[in-house]
Image: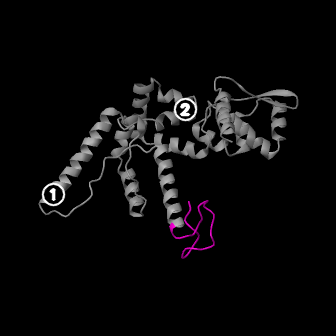
Amino acid sequence: MAGTRQADVLTELDDERPDEPFIVQLGGRQVPFRPATGPPWRDLLVALDDWPMFVELFGPQRRRDIKRVERLPSWAMVALVRAWRRHHGLCATDAEHRQLVGMLSKAAYRNAVERDLRETHRLDLGQEWRARRWRRLLNLIDGLGRTSHLHEVMTQDDELAEAVLKAESKGDEVKPTRRMREFGPDVEVLSTIADRLGELIVVTGMTKGVKPRRAEPMPRPETAYHRARERWVRRKHNYTVARVFGYIDAKGKPTGRQPPGGTPPTS
């Protein structure tokens, strides 16, 4: 299954050819569709969910070919639009389009992204936008680090700060982390020094009668290895508890004894 998913990703990348015409074989005839560039971006977004509008704006120009397209069953229409948007480098989902549009609709964000793309990738935001290379554009924006102009603007966004506080008030507080690409050897050493200094401050305070408290460590990157290790430790703990109380045997099979209120915690 994993190999199939990898093949699908590579096939999608191979199918992305925005500089070439999109041609469909219909009724023994090659039918060319118009490119994603040209119509306003609002019309493009609406047309992706509106088949008649899509055919009007981006379908074939010859009337005979339009008739062939209009006779397609609904499942074929959906597949055709999906292939067309992938061919032209658009985002795979409408949610990604909304994310990109929502961000660039704010002048401060747009200006920051424009500077980041120019400085980091030597790309022009306007050209990428008008070329409808939106998948690549969103990918590059998501990859910008904490030292980017975009991140600086986000830290000064009062509306975003209010949204974060609202989420935290509902118990959705997110523990701060660092990206691995931002956690070089120098940052790792400084983080360790900061942790030891915090522990020293706590111990010094305890000698002066201050109530003991835990020194919060500096944020570290979260990796797949750490998540896998946490799952492994949790499974091992649950297995040990279940064995001690006789809920499972040495092979992990239930013995018939049940803990209060549920099944043996084996995973």
Q: Main secondary structure of the magenta part?
A: loop
Residue at image mark 1: 205
Q: How is the image coloured?
A: one colour
Q: Is residue 262 magenta?
A: yes
- Which region is colored magenta? 244-267
For the residue pair 186 and 16, the one nearer the viewer reads as 186
Residue 168: image location, x then y, percent: 39, 59
Q: Is residue 177 left or right of residue 254?
A: left
For the residue pair 33 and 209, the one nearer the viewer reads as 209
Badge 2, how many Cα within 10 Å: few under 14, some, many 20+?
some
**Disc 2 to disc 1: CB gap under 8 Å:** no
> Within the image, what quadrant is residue 91 found in?
top right
- What's the residue at 38%, 36% (across, down)? 182
- Examine the rendered structure and indicate whether residue 251 appears above or below residue 132: below
Residue 166 lies, in percent from the top left, at 40, 60
Residue sitting farthest toward the bottom: 260
Give the residue at the far left of this rendering: 208
Give the x, y percent position of residue 13: 63, 30
Which element type, helix, strand or loop, lies under badge 1?
helix
Which-is-in-front pick, marks 2 and 1? Answer: 1
| Left or right relative to 137: residue 9 | right
Q: Residue at x 26, y 47 (%)?
A: 195
Q: Is residue 229 left or right of residue 218?
A: right
Magenta segment includes 41? no
> Viewed as shown, does residue 250 lie left or right of 30?
left
Instruction: Check disc 1 and give the amino acid type.
Output: Gly
Q: Which mark is residue 136?
A: 2
